Image: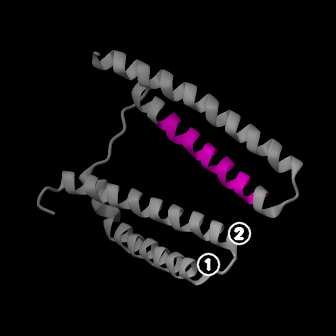
Amino acid sequence: MKTKELQEKLVETMKSWQKVENASVSSTGQIIEKTENPVVRLVMEIIQRDSQLHYRVQEMIVNSLEQKALSLTPEELGEIWEKVEKHIEIENRTIELAQEALTAVKGKKLVIQEYLINYLLEDEEKHNKLLNSLSKIKSGMYPYG
């Protein structure tokens, strides 16, 4: 597959995916309207916000292929890298706290709390992974840094 064909296919896939994300936002909204249960409402709100963010990421991918290519320069990363490293420390602390909380509730019949703490832990680990991947991009830009 040629580059142009690949890009067109990727744009088509992203736009189809955006339609699914919109359906997810609508579906979660309908569930929120039908329930007063705070746990179900919270879960639906989390999914809804994630779907909205996924839509934005997909839009950025489409725009990068149809309008303007994405770029990230060593200078741009260098200007903020110290702050990124401090944020990585913050994320690591949130993971530690989530693990402590999970250990405290494990086997204590606090199933809803355990469920929510597991969600928080997984989300914090996702943040950490995003930042570590950004670090790998930086390493690729700075082979000796």
* Quadrant, the C terminus: bottom left
Question: Can you identify the residue that label 1 sits on?
Answer: 107
Please state the horizontal and vertical placement of residue 143, each as a whole percent of the image: 13, 56
Badge 1 density bin: few <14, some 14–19, many ≥20, Cα 10 Å? few
Q: Residue at x 69, y 71 (%)?
A: 111
* Quadrant, the N terminus: top left
Please state the horizontal and vertical placement of residue 91, each as a whole percent of the image: 45, 71
Q: Residue at x 58, y 84 (%)?
A: 104
Q: Is the residue under label 2 in contact with that under label 1 (CB below 8 Å)? A: no
Please state the horizontal and vertical placement of residue 97, each as a whole percent of the image: 52, 80
Query: Which residue is nearer to you in this view: 88 or 96?
Result: 96
Say whether disc 1 or disc 2 marks the residue closer to the N-terminus: 1
- 88 sits left or right of 19 in the view: left
Q: Amino acid at mark 2?
A: Ile
Gap between marks 1 and 2 measured at Cα: 12 Å
Q: Amino acid at mark 1?
A: Gly
Circle 1: element type: loop
Question: Can you identify the residue that label 2 sits on?
Answer: 112
Against 58, residue 103 (above or below) is below
Q: Main secondary structure of the magenta part?
A: helix
Quadrant of res 114? bottom right
Q: Residue at x 31, y 62 (%)?
A: 79
Query: Which residue is nearer to you in this view: 93 or 83?
Result: 93
Q: Which residues are magenta?
A: 41-60
Question: How is this picture coloured?
Answer: one colour
Q: Residue at x 11, y 60 (%)?
A: 144
**Label for residue 65?**
none
Please state the horizontal and vertical placement of residue 102, each as a whole percent of the image: 56, 77
